[in-house]
């Protein structure tokens, strides 16, 4: 079985609920009985199906990247590629976010290279 992919909010909710309740069976039972009843820091779990909750508890999870994080990954991969044509791809990413007036740290923000 693969790890489930969660939003950042869902991942934080999982970690918060694990700090409060160390018994995974209790967490799962609560989710089954009140799947839309999570409140406060745990509220993002209301959008999580039972299978994903169980897999995130027992197998683990990965946090879904934001579009900005995906662009940063692509930018650095292509900027540092040994073939110069890939550098143009990185330049295109930077130009596009500049045109759209978007700032992404690591590309065109304070920590850009």
Image (cartoon, grey):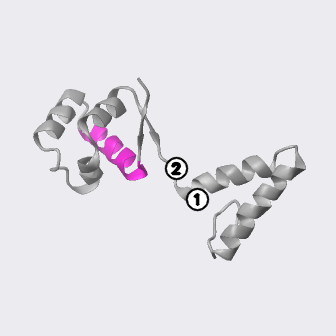
- Point out the stretch of residues depicted in magenta: 7-20
The quadrant of the image that shows the C terminus is bottom right
Q: Nearer the viewer, residue 18 or 28?
A: 28
Label 1 sits on residue: 68
Which residue is at 25% across, 53% downward?
A: 43
> Which quadrant holds residue 26?
top left
Residue 72 x/y as whole percent: 66, 55
Q: Is residue 62 above or below residue 71?
A: above
Q: CA distance from mark 1 to mark 2?
A: 8 Å
Residue 50 x/y as whole percent: 24, 36
The quadrant of the image that shows the N terminus is top left
Q: Is residue 49 above or below residue 66?
A: above
> Which quadrant holds residue 94?
bottom right
Q: Are marks 1 and 2 in contact (CB under 8 Å)?
A: no
Q: Residues within 10 Å of mark 2 (few under 14, many from 20)?
A: some
Q: Is residue 25 magenta?
A: no
Q: Is residue 83 left or right of residue 100?
A: right
Q: Is residue 64 above or below residue 27?
A: below
Residue 53 x/y as whole percent: 29, 36
Residue 52 x/y as whole percent: 32, 36
Which residue is at 35% across, 48% downward?
A: 10
Q: Residues within 10 Å of mark 1 (few under 14, many from 20)?
A: some
Q: How many marks?
A: 2
Q: Nearer the viewer, residue 30 or 93?
A: 93
Q: Is residue 73 left or right of residue 86?
A: left
Which residue is at 65% across, 63% downward?
A: 105
Label 1 residue SS: helix
Label 2 sits on residue: 65
């Amino acid at each position: 079985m693969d790890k489930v992919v969660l939003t950042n909010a869902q991942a934080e909710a999982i970690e918060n609920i694990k700090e409060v309740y160390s018994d995974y069976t209790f967490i799962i039972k609560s989710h089954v009985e009140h799947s839309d009843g999570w409140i406060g820091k745990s509220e993002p779990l209301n959008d999580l199906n039972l299978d994903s909750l169980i897999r995130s508890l027992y197998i683990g999870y990965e946090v879904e990247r934001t579009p900005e994080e995906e662009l940063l990954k692509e930018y650095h991969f292509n900027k540092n590629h040994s073939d110069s044509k890939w550098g143009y791809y990185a330049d295109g990413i930077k130009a596009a976010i500049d045109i759209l007036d978007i700032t992404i740290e690591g590309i065109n923000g304070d920590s850009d290279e």
